[in-house]
Amino acid sequence: MADQLDDYINAVARAMSLPLEDAWRPAVRANLEVSLQLARMVDEFPLPDEAESAAIYSA
């Protein structure tokens, strides 16, 4: 998966014309790994079929 993440980072940087210095790569990769872990947790959280979205969001 390491090569896939690096390939993804390179492809997105190219597609968005973002300069990506070599010194930034470890931080970008760490952020992406954490984001993917959080997304996996949300995706795996079981919800009943009857669940409805909230009508009002507040903090």
Image (spheres, grey):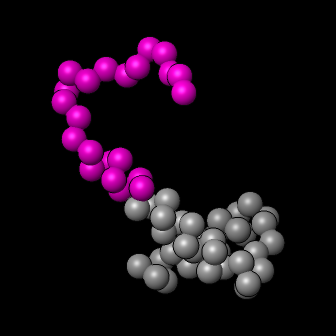
How far from the left and from the top, in percent, is residue 29? 57, 74
Q: Give the range drawn in magenta.
A: 38-59
Figure quadrant of residue 50: top left
Q: Is residue 16 visible?
A: yes
Residue 44 is inside the magenta segment = yes
**Residue at 48% in and 64% down:** 34
Q: Residue at x 74, y 60 (%)?
A: 16
Relative to 25, 40 lies left or right: left
Q: Percent x, y for residue 36?
A: 44, 61
Q: Does residue 7 show up? A: no
Nearer to us in this view, 34 or 22: 34
User: Taking 50 as reference, is 40 left or right?
Assistant: right
The residue drawn where x is 53% and y is 22% is 58
Please determine whether, in this image, residue 2 is positioned above or below residue 38: below
Q: Give the main secondary structure of the magenta stretch.
A: loop
Front residue of this view, candidates 51 and 11: 51
Percent x, y for residue 56? 48, 16
Q: Is residue 23 above or below residue 5?
A: below
Q: Position of residue 49 (x, y in %)?
A: 19, 27
Please say if 46 is above or below 30.
above
Image quarter of the C terminus: top right
